[in-house]
Structures are given as C-alpha cells and as structure tokens.
Amino acid sequence: MADIQGHGTKLYYGTTTNATTEIGVITSISGPDETADSIEMTDFDSDAAEFVQGLRDPGELTLDVKYHQTHSATLRSIEERSDTTNTPYIFRVVFNDDEATPTYWHCSGYITALGHAIPHDDIVRQSVTIKFTGKSTASFDA
C-alpha cells in the first residue's frame, strides 16, 4: 500500500454505511481518537495490577471548513436532526489513496459542536465536532 495523502480526503454522511452526501470545503480533519476503558481486576491473590479491556469509545472527529452558505446550512441541518430526532447519521471518511477499493472509516455520530472563526484578515471558517456512537468500521489495504 502506498502512502496516503490527506489532500483529496472526503467526508460523507447519510443514513446507510455507504453514506454518499459530501460535506465539502474541508480544510482539516482531526481524529477520530478511539479509546477503550481499562477495568481493574486486581485481587488479593494478584502479583501485580491486572486489567481487562472495557468498552470501546469510538471518539470524536473535528473538522474545519471554509464558511459557505450551502455547506453551513447542511451542517446546521445535520445538527438540528440530532436535536429533534435523536437519530445519528453515519459519517464516512474516504481517503484519497487512488485505489479501486478506497480506504475508509465510518461510524454513526452526532454534531456536538458547531463554531465559527471570523478573523478580520482571512476567510470565515467553521469548526465542527462529531461525537461517534457505537462500533466503527474501517477498511484498510494490507
């Protein structure tokens, strides 16, 4: 597998795992940072602290986008859907790896933060945080 460049990476959302509606004008994506709880199992017979893996947290994804009326309205509608129906969308990150079968990562989630940066000498941007819920799925070439 060749190195994957961030340029050309796409973020889609939808109601199925093959989410096809693109969130555009993205300038950066951070995350998700998946973690697992550690459950201590140490008892009086233990020689050292003992742990087992607990539930996994699929983490959060933070992205920055250039402010654009159409895309901002889309982000607001995704956020409002979470508020009114409590039904998450599926978000799918597709990497630009020029493969016939693209590398991707997807998980259900909600927009939990939608902010704005309005500098006097640069373009207006939005910062979006998506909190994931449930199990994530990834497809990476070996």
Image: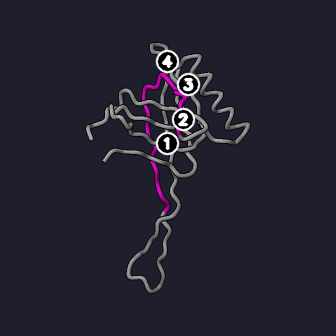
Q: Residue at x 68, y 32 (%)?
A: 80
Q: Residue at x 48, y 58 (%)?
A: 36
- Amino acid, disc 1: His
Q: Residue at x 58, y 39 (%)?
A: 16
Pointer 1: residues within 10 angstroms few (<14), some, or many (20+)? many
- Amino acid, disc 3: His
Q: Position of residue 10 (x, y in %)?
A: 44, 30
Tell me the quarter of the picture where residue 140 sits.
top left
**Are discs 1 and 2 less than 8 Å apart at CB?**
yes
Residue found farthest to the top:
121
Q: Disc number at residue 116?
A: 3
Q: Disc number at residue 19?
A: 2
Which secondary structure lies at badge 2? loop
Query: Which residue is identified by label 4?
Result: 119
- Is residue 39 positioned above or below 58 on the image? below
Residue found farthest to the front:
100
Residue found farthest to the right:
84
